[in-house]
Image (tube, rainbow, N blue to C red):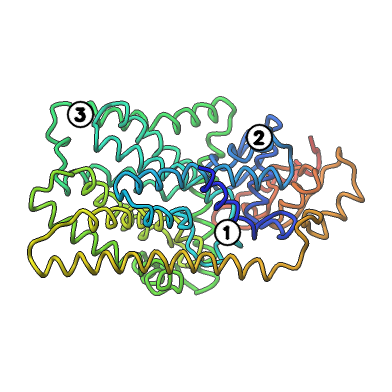
Amino acid sequence: MALLGGVTLLMMFPTIPTMRYQGRDNGIFAYTATVIAEGGVPYRDALDNKLPLVYYANAAGILLLGSNRWAIWLNEWVLWQPQRWPFLRWCGPWTDHAGWRCHWPFLPPSKPGRMASFRMATLLKATRCCSRCWAYLWGLRFLQQPSRKWGALLGLACGLAFLARQNTVGLALVFVPALLLAGHPVWRSPRRWAYLGSMIAGGLSAPLLLATYLAATNALDDAYQATFVFPGALHAWISIAESEGEHTFFETLYTSLTSETFETMVMPMVAFAALGAALAGVQRWRGNPDKALITLGAWAVLAFVVDLATANLTDRAFPHYYITPVAPLMVSLICLAVAARRARPTRPSLQGAVWVARVGLAVFMGLLTLSTLNGMREAIVELDQPITGDVQERVLTTFVRQNTTPDDLVLVWGASSEINFQSGRHSPTNFHYAYPLIVPGYTTDAMLNDFLNDLATPA
C-alpha cells in the first residue's frame, strides 16, 4: 500500500496546487461541494449537470481539511488508492510473480497515459473509477464464492459508479450476459434468483437513498432536470452550433474509433484484450474449471463495448471521455496475463499464441509504464512555478478577495466557479455558472425569472 500511495503521489505531482491552476470542472465541483459542506443541497442550492457522488466526496475532504485547493487535491489522492489496490490484489495471487506486479501501480485504470488527462484531472475521475474498480473486485469475489453478500456489494459498487457518472450504467447491465456467455455455473444454481435480487437491491440502495433525500429537500425535480435533461440539451446545442446538425450514434462511434486518443492509447490494449478473449474462449470450450476468470474477462469485454459506445455521445472526442472504457480494458489485460501464464497448450499453434501473448504483454506493459513516467517528466519540466510557492489562482480571484468581504455575494458570469471557491465568496444564485441559462430548448422563462429574483433579493 505504501508503494501504491507513493506512486500515486508521483503521478499526481504535475497537478499540485502550487504548480497548476484549478480547472473549470474542478472549480465547479469544488464550489458545489463547499455549498454542501455548509449544509446546502445539491441542485437546489448549487446547480450542476453531474450526478452528486463527486460533490459529496469533495465535501468530505472540505469538512476534514477546510475549503481550499489542498483539500481537493489530497482528497483525490486518497480516492486513487482504493482503485489501485484491487488491481494489485488480482495480479498478486494469480500471477505469483513480482515481475508482473511491479507494473500495475504505474497503470492507472482510469486515465489514459497521455498527459492531457493529467491536465484535465478532476476528482470526478477518481470517484468514478474507484467505485468501478471495487465493482470488479467484488464481482470477482461473487464469481469465486457466489453469495448474497458479494452480490449486494457488487450491486452497491455499480450503483455508486452510476452516481459518479451517468454512462457507467453498462457495468451493471452486462454482468448477467457475461455469466451466460462464459457458462458460469451460478446461472444454473437454484439460488440464482436470490443472488440476482441481492444485486438489484444493492444497486438500487444508494440511488434510492439519494432520491429520497432530494425529494425530502424539494430538490428531486431540479436534480432530474440538471443531470438527465440538461446534458443532452447542452451537447445537442453545441453539436448543432459546431456542425450545423445533430450527430447520429454511428457518427459518434466512428469519431471515437478514429480519434487520436483511441488510436494511440486504447487500440493497443484492445489488441491484447482480443487475444485474451481468444485464449479464454479456448479454455471455455475445453471445459477449463476456472469459470471465475473467464467470466471476469467476458464481463470486462462486454463492459468495454458498452462504455466505448456511450463515451462520445457528444461527438467531441475529448481525451477524458475515454477514461471510462480504459477501466474494463485494464481488467481484460489482467485476465490475459493470468490466462497466458497458466496456459499449457499441447498444439503448436496454440503454443505460439501463448508465447506471443506472454512476450507481447510484457513488452507492452513495460512500454506503457515508461510512457507514463515520461509523460510525467514532460509535465513537470513544463511547470515553471516553485513547489513551495503560493497556490496558483486566477487574477480575478485576487481581485474579488481584495475588493469584497467574506459576507459579500459575488456573481461570476460564465463557467468559472473556481473564482467563487478560491475567494471564499458565495454566488447569489444557484446558477453559479451560466450554461443552464443560455441553452435553447432547455432554458425557460421560469429559470430566468428565478435567476433575476436571486439577484434582486439575494439570500
In front: label 1 or label 3:
3
- Amino acid type at circle 3 is Trp
> How many residues crowd around disc 2 within 10 Å: few (fewer than 14), some, or many (20 or more)?
many
Q: Residue furthest right?
A: 403
Could you tell me which secondary element the residue under label 3 belongs to?
A: helix
Residue sitting at x 27%, y 64%: 358
Sequence-wise, the earlier of marks 3 and 2 is 2
Q: CA distance from mark 1 to mark 3?
A: 46 Å
Q: Nearer the viewer, residue 161 or 119?
A: 119
Q: Quadrant of residue 131?
A: top left
Q: Which mark is residue 193?
A: 3
Q: Which mark is residue 36?
A: 2
1 and 3 marks in contact (CB < 8 Å):
no
1 and 2 marks in contact (CB < 8 Å):
no
Residue sitting at x 13%, y 27%: 190
> How many residues crowd around disc 3 within 10 Å: few (fewer than 14), some, or many (20 or more)?
few
Q: Is residue 292 left or right of residue 408?
A: left
- Amino acid type at circle 1 is Pro
In front: label 1 or label 2:
2
The image shows residue 148 at horizontal and vertical percentages of: 28, 26
> How many residues crowd around disc 1 within 10 Å: few (fewer than 14), some, or many (20 or more)?
few
- The quadrant of the picture occupied by the C terminus is top right
Q: Is residue 323 left or right of residue 136?
A: right
Q: CA distance from mark 3 to mark 2?
A: 39 Å
Could you tell me which secondary element the residue under label 2 belongs to?
A: helix
Q: Is residue 269 left or right of residue 234?
A: left
Q: Which mark is residue 440?
A: 1
3 and 2 marks in contact (CB < 8 Å):
no
- Amino acid type at circle 2 is Ile
Q: Which mark is residue 90?
A: none
Q: Nearer the viewer, residue 304 or 233?
A: 304
